[in-house]
């Protein structure tokens, strides 16, 4: 029995069904997962539109006549709806083709092996040998932010908003926040970003953050560094965001991007004796088991990396563990080897050991870096921003990690991710005869 039809639940269901298990999935909102279908996919769709506008704005440098693209919000809204609808139907078709039973409703635990579901036709109770809790998360909304979906927005009010903000104040400079800065500045909004620390993406490599900050400043984005928002006031046709240091950011709209909270509060975990931490996350072991062995947790609910790719792999591993238990072929997840990306312009992606973390641990590493300014393909594309950086073991040459900033970084990081996961050495990348001219050539040059 799976509560939640997002990436974790859907992948667990299809994999378990292929392994011969009877599977039921309970979903309250949308097959495919609210975080994916209401956040990730719509935001990347808008970023793609903004990227097209940015590209058209520089086509004169590529030998074309001037263009003046304009945004049609209604067409963009329909495009996003069409994409998410198609993806949701595809996921549902895959599930039903594997004989997975789908129940529309809200589920909760009613005992150690019992799940209660509130459906449109009334309550239903079902027994299960194993239960996966994968109910995801929702945007975090502090008491000082009067969200109205009009001028003061959460991320889920912005795909797209009712009107394009004239001046958007983004609160939060993590992954979601910087993607919104890029998105709306590309679409034509003036943007102010409130940065609580002294760099955006404070957990990322400072070199990576510096490239992004430089791009933001080039776009005219205002950065309020070292400022923590404490109140949002709405007045007339605008908003004011007050910070703890006395500064105030004025705009037409404010958007809150300060993280999420797990959807664990309505699962009745206590009825089955499942532990939950003070933040609402459900602690799991390396098999994704909770303290109750036949009850598993995955995705945002588990408190691990909040990535769809991680959730999907957790679901797959859970299905294997339910069916075959711990065997030699059941490899544990190593969250430190998960690749991640930020879809700004330039894109940012990384995987494995970061240079700053290695230095903090006193670990000896070899760091090699190649700028895209040396790439023929980057010059052909008229976008030579960024670099490739590879971290390796100086004694063995094994690839430990890497960072990429630049065009298609989210795609290019896959090569380094495979190297990290498979324990390949830098010369394995160097000796790969890659296509010329491509951006991927910079990977081999950085590994050399």
Image: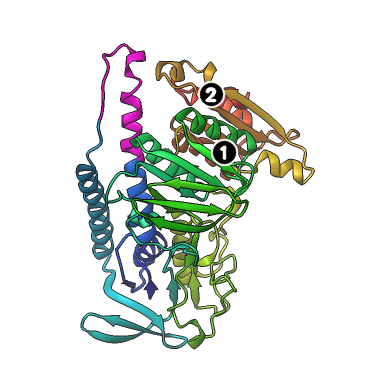
Question: Is 149 included in the stretch rendered in magenta?
Answer: no
Q: Which is nearer the eye, 136 or 220?
A: 220
Q: Give the range drawn in magenta.
A: 47-69
Left or right: 23, with 200 as reference point:
left
Task: Give the quadrant of the N terminus.
Answer: bottom left
Left or right: 197, with 69 as reference point:
right
Q: Which is nearer the eye, 438 or 140?
A: 140
Residue 173 in view:
no
Tell me residue 303's x, y (percent): 55, 64
| Residue 110 falls in image quadrant | bottom left
The residue indicated by pointer 1 is 419
The residue indicated by pointer 2 is 442
Q: Reply above or below: 226 against 405.
A: below
Q: Reply above or below: 275 against 86.
A: below
Q: Reply above or below: 170 against 349.
A: below
**Dot 1: element:** helix
**Dot 2: element:** helix
Q: Which residue is at a point 45% across and 88% down the rendered structure image?
A: 111
Task: Give the quadrant of the C terminus.
Answer: top right
Question: Is 51 included in the stretch rendered in magenta?
Answer: yes
Disc with the residue nearer the chain's start (1 vs 2) = 1
Cα distance, mark 1 to mark 2? 15 Å
Name the front one of labels 1 and 2: 2
Tell me residue 198's x, y (percent): 64, 42
Q: Residues within 10 Å of mark 1 (few under 14, many from 20)?
A: many
Left or right: 74, with 22 as reference point:
left
Tell me residue 226's x, y (percent): 63, 46
Q: Which residue is at a point 44% across and 77% down the rendered structure image?
A: 130
Number of numbered tags placed on the structure image: 2
Tell me residue 147's x, y (percent): 39, 62
What label sits on residue 101 in the rendered view? none
Q: Are marks 1 and 2 in contact (CB under 8 Å)?
A: no
């Amino acid at each position: 029995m799976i509560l939640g039809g997002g990436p974790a639940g859907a992948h667990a269901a299809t994999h378990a069904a292929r392994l011969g298990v009877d599977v039921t999935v309970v979903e309250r909102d949308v097959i495919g997962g609210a975080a994916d279908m209401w956040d990730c996919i719509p935001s990347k769709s808008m970023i793609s539109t903004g990227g097209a506008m940015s590209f058209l704005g520089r086509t004169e440098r590529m030998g074309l006549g001037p263009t003046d693209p304009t945004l049609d919000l209604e067409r963009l809204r329909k495009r996003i709806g069409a994409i998410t609808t198609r993806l949701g139907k595809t996921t549902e078709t895959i599930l039903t083709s594997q004989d997975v039973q789908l129940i529309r409703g809200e589920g909760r635990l009613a005992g150690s092996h019992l799940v209660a579901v509130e459906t449109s036709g009334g309550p239903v109770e079902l027994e299960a040998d194993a239960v996966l809790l994968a109910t995801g998360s929702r945007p975090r909304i502090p008491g000082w932010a009067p969200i109205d979906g009009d001028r003061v927005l959460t991320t889920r009010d912005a795909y797209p908003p009712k009107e394009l903000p004239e001046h958007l104040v983004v609160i939060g400079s993590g992954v979601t926040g910087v993607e919104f800065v890029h998105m709306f500045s590309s679409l034509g909004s003036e943007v102010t970003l409130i940065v609580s620390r002294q760099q955006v993406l404070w957990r990322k490599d400072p070199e990576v953050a510096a490239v992004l900050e430089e791009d933001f400043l080039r776009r005219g984005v205002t950065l309020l560094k070292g400022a923590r928002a404490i109140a949002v006031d709405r007045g007339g046709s605008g908003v004011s965001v007050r910070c703890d240091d006395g500064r105030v950011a004025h705009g037409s709209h404010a958007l809150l991007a300060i993280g999420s909270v797990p959807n664990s509060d309505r699962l009745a975990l206590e009825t089955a004796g499942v532990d939950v931490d003070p933040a609402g996350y459900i602690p799991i072991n390396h098999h994704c088991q909770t303290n109750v062995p036949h009850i598993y947790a995955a995705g945002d609910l588990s408190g691990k990396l909040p990535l769809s790719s991680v959730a999907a792999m957790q679901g797959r591993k859970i299905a294997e563990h339910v069916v075959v238990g711990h065997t030699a072929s059941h490899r544990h997840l190593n969250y430190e080897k998960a690749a991640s990306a930020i879809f700004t312009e330039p894109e940012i992606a990384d995987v494995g050991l970061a240079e700053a973390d290695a230095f903090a641990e006193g670990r000896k590493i070899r760091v090699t870096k190649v700028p895209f300014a040396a790439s023929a393909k980057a010059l052909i594309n008229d976008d030579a921003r960024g670099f490739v950086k590879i971290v390796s073991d100086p004694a063995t040459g094994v690839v430990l990690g890497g960072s990429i900033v630049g065009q298609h970084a989210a795609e290019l990081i896959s090569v380094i991710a495979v190297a990290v996961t498979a324990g390949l050495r830098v010369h394995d990348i160097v000796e790969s005869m890659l296509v010329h001219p491509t951006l991927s050539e910079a990977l081999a040059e950085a590994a050399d």
